[in-house]
Amino acid sequence: MAYRRIAALAIVAAFSPSQGYAQPDKGKPLEVDAAASVGAYAVDLGSGKAIWEYNANRWLTPASVTKLLTTGAALATKGSDARLHTKIELSQDSAGGKILCVRGEYDPTTSSRYFNKMQLADAAKKIAEKLKSLGISELSNIIVDDSRACQDAASPKCLWEDMGNHYGAAPTIVSIYDNNVELYYSTPQASGELCRLDSVVPDLAGLKPRTYIKTHASAADKSQIYMGGDDTWYATGFIPCGRKSYRLRGAMPHPTTQYGKALSELLRQNGISVSRYETGAAGAGEEVMLIESPTIAEIIKVTNHESVNLFADGLAFNMAMSKNAAGVVTWESAADAVMSFWREKAGLEMNLDDGSGLSPQGAVSAKTIVAAISYMRRSGEWAAYKSSLPTAGRSGTAQRLGHGTELSGRARVKSGTMTGVMAYAGVLTTRQGREVAFCIMVNHYKETQGNLRAKIADWLIKIYNDKK
C-alpha cells in the first residue's frame, strides 16, 4: 500500500505546475495608460499549455485581426486549391437577339493589381473566340446579374471616414480593378486653394465626384472620398501644395455597371458588336465559360499580408452565398457565415459585422483568436494559413513590428489597427524551439502608435526568450 501511495504521489508531482509547465504569467503585458483596455493570451501549441494570460476572455475590438477568422474559415471550408468563379452564360431575348449574362459569386480578384491586371481582357478574348465559333458576332445585351447582390454599398457599421475612402472599397457580386478608382489632381502652390481634378482612371463614362479638395502645407494626405447615396460622389479634404499630378485612390461607384462597361468594350475590341449593357436579374442560359480566381491559398496570402479589406469581405460574402442557395446576401449574413463556422467547428463565440474588421463594433477575446489559430494548426490547411501571415519585422503590415530586434523573422503576425485600436495575433517560434500562438489587443490607448508597437514587440520578445 505504501508503495502505491508513493507511486501515485510521484505521478501527481510529475504533472504539477512546479515540476512541469509553470502557471501562465498573469501580469499586465504592457505599461500603457491605465484607462486602456488590454487583453492578451499566449499558448504553447505543442502542449496546449497557456504561458501568458491577461484579461484573455475580455471582448475587445480586433480591427483587421478579424481577417484571421475570415481567412481561416474560408480556407478550412473550401480548401487551399479551390477557386471562386464568375459564370458567363448565353441566352436570347424575345426578338432572337443574343444576351450574355455575367453571374458572379463575389470573387474580389478580377483584374486586381495584386494578381493579373489583364484577367478580364484575357477572358474577353476567350469569350469572343467562343462566340465566333458559335457563329455569333453581335450581342443585343450584356446583363450583369446583381439580383442576389447586397443592397448596401458599404457596411452601415463602418466608420464614416472609411466608407469608400482609400481602402474601404466594398465587395460586389462581380468586382473589377479592386473596385477602386484613381483621381488625379493638379495642386496650386499656395495653401487653401481648390485643386483641379484632371482625370479619373479608369474612365467612368464621365462620372466624376463633386470635388472640394484643397491644398495645405503638409505633405500628408488628409482627403476623404465617399458616396453620399447611390448617385452622389464626393472628394473632400486636403492634399499637398505644388504637385503636377497627385493621385488619390477611392472606392469605385457602381462596380457592377463598370464591369459590364469594361466587358462590352473588350468584346468590341475582339470583334463582337455589343448594343448595350446593364445590371439586373437575368434568366438562365447556356454556359459559355468560367472565369476563375486565383486559388484560395493565394487570395488569403494577399489578404493577410497586405490587409486587403475587399478580399476579406469578398470571402465572407462568398461563404454566405454558398450557405444560402437562392437568397440575397447581406452584410449580416456575410458576418454570420464567418461566426457560424467558428461556433459550429470550434465552439467559439464572437461579434462580427463584416469579414475585414473595419467595423469598430466588432468584438472578440484574445483567447478566442488563439483558439482559432490552434484550430487551424490541427487542420490540414495549416501550412497555407501560416504562410499567409506577414513576417514580423520583415514583410507586409507586420514590417514595423520588432524590426531590427531579435523578434524580426521569428513570428508570423496579422496586425489590426484603427483609431484607438492596436492588435497583433499569430504564431512565433521561441528560442527553445516551441511554437506559440498569441494574441494581444489594446483598445482606447493614448500614446503614439510607434511607442505602443514597440511595447508589443517587447512582450513578444519576452515570450520568445521564455525558458519555462
Image (cartoon, rainbow, N blue to C red):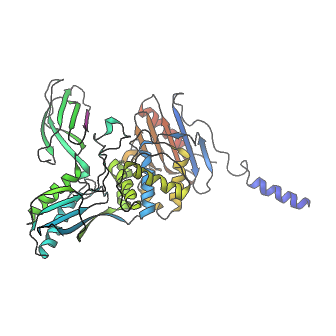
Whole-percent x and y of residue 28? 58, 35
In this view of the protein, which residue sits in the foreground, 351 or 31? 351
Q: Residue at x 16, y 65 (%)?
A: 99
The quadrant in which residue 213 appears is: top left
Q: Residue at x 53, y 44 (%)?
A: 365
Q: Is residue 152 magenta?
A: no
Q: Residue at x 18, y 52 (%)?
A: 258
User: Which part of the image, by quadrant, shows the N terminus?
Assistant: bottom right
Q: Residue at x 39, y 51 (%)?
A: 304
- Along the horizontal axis of the image, is 105 left or right of 30? left
Name, please, the residue furthest toward the right.
1
The image shows a total of numbered marks equal to 0
In this view of the protein, which residue sits in the foreground, 96 or 8? 96
The quadrant in which residue 57 appears is: top right
Give the extent of the magenta segment.
216-229
- Along the horizontal axis of the image, is 117 left or right of 363? left
Q: Is residue 69 above or below residue 28?
A: below
Name, please, the residue furthest toward the front.
94
Whole-percent x and y of residue 3? 89, 61
Asked whether the viewer can see residue 391, the reply is no
Whole-percent x and y of residue 105? 31, 60
- Along the horizontal axis of the image, is 302 left or right of 223? right
Asked whether the viewer can see residue 82, the reply is yes
Q: Is residue 131 above or below residue 53?
A: below
Whole-percent x and y of residue 319? 40, 58
